[in-house]
Image (cartoon, grey):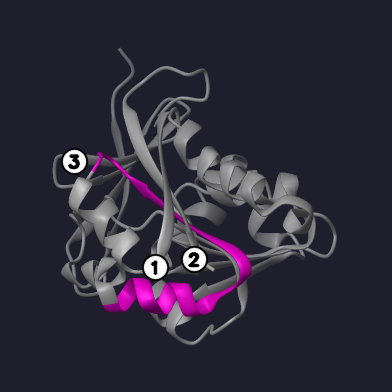
């Protein structure tokens, strides 16, 4: 069996430590004993971008997307594959080491997506990007922490509060979509989205791109007119 190798450790601002692990060609990011991300499981992260763009219709190719959390880059790469030359993907990443890992030990996996001219990297909390982005984005894609029931950082919870959802709604352009990834369904959060003035489409997506693996939840929320 190929041994598990500890590559590096990152401190989450206001939170715990993340560990970058590698087994052969596979990368994992762990929090304590919890595996947050694995390079073998890209399906639901790719679906976050692809299914959001499907909902934008003709404006998808030129959309400005805000992606909360780079992670292993699957959502960004899926977005860039569908965006045209006029499209843009702003990535808000809180942890500097995540970007260092993407450009260092995981450079082959990253495949140059952070150097794409359509990519804008913003270091900092995605909640700040949302609050400052009134009417700026066609889509906001949130793969932050473990979903509304966070693990990594208590402050992440503010994104999913009534005030956080109101800020996201205000940051969307007409016809825009807020897409939120979660490790598990959450009926109370789905109700909170509807109470915040969104039409909600809850989808279950497999973790692996081949349609296998754990089931994850994505909420696609569009403001009611």
For label 2, the residue is 223
* Residue 175, quarter of picture: bottom right
- Alpha carbon distance from label 3 to label 2: 34 Å
Kindly report the distance in space between the C-alpha atoms of the residues bearing marks 2 and 1: 6 Å
Residue where numbered disc 3 is placed:
34
Give the number of the mark in front: 3 or 2. Answer: 2
First in sequence: mark 3 or mark 2? 3
Residue 127 belongs to the span the image colors magenta: no
Q: Position of residue 61 (x, y in %)?
A: 78, 55
Residue 196's spot in the image, x, y percent? 33, 69
* Quadrant in the picture for the C terminus: bottom right
Q: Are marks 2 and 1 in contact (CB under 8 Å)?
A: yes
Q: How many marks?
A: 3
| Rendered view: 26 above or below 91 | above
* Magenta-tinted stretch: 163-185
Work out whether mark 1 precedes mark 3 in sequence or the reverse, and give the earlier one: 3
**SS state under label 3:** strand
């Amino acid at each position: 069996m190929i041994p598990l190798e500890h590559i590096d450790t990152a401190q989450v601002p206001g939170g715990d430590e993340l560990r970058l692990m590698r087994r052969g060609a596979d990368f994992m990011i762990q929090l304590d004993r919890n595996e947050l991300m694995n390079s073998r499981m890209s399906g639901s992260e790719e679906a976050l971008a692809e299914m959001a763009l499907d909902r934008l219709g003709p404006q998808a190719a030129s959309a400005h997307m805000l992606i909360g959390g780079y992670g292993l880059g699957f959502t960004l790469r899926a977005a860039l594959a569908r965006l045209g030359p006029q499209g843009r993907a702003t990535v808000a990443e809180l942890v500097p080491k995540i970007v260092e890992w993407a450009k260092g030990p995981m450079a082959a996996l990253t495949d140059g997506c952070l150097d794409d001219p359509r990519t804008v990297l913003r270091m900092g909390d995605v909640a700040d990007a949302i609050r400052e982005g009134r009417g700026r984005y066609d889509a906001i894609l949130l793969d932050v922490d473990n979903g509304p029931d966070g693990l990594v950082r208590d402050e992440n919870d503010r994104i999913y509060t009534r005030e956080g959802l109101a800020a996201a709604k205000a940051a969307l352009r007409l016809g825009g979509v807020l897409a939120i990834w979660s490790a598990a369904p959450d009926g109370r959060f789905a109700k909170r989205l509807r109470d915040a003035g969104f039409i909600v489409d809850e989808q279950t997506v497999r973790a692996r791109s081949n349609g296998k693996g754990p089931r994850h939840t994505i909420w696609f929320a569009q403001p009611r007119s």
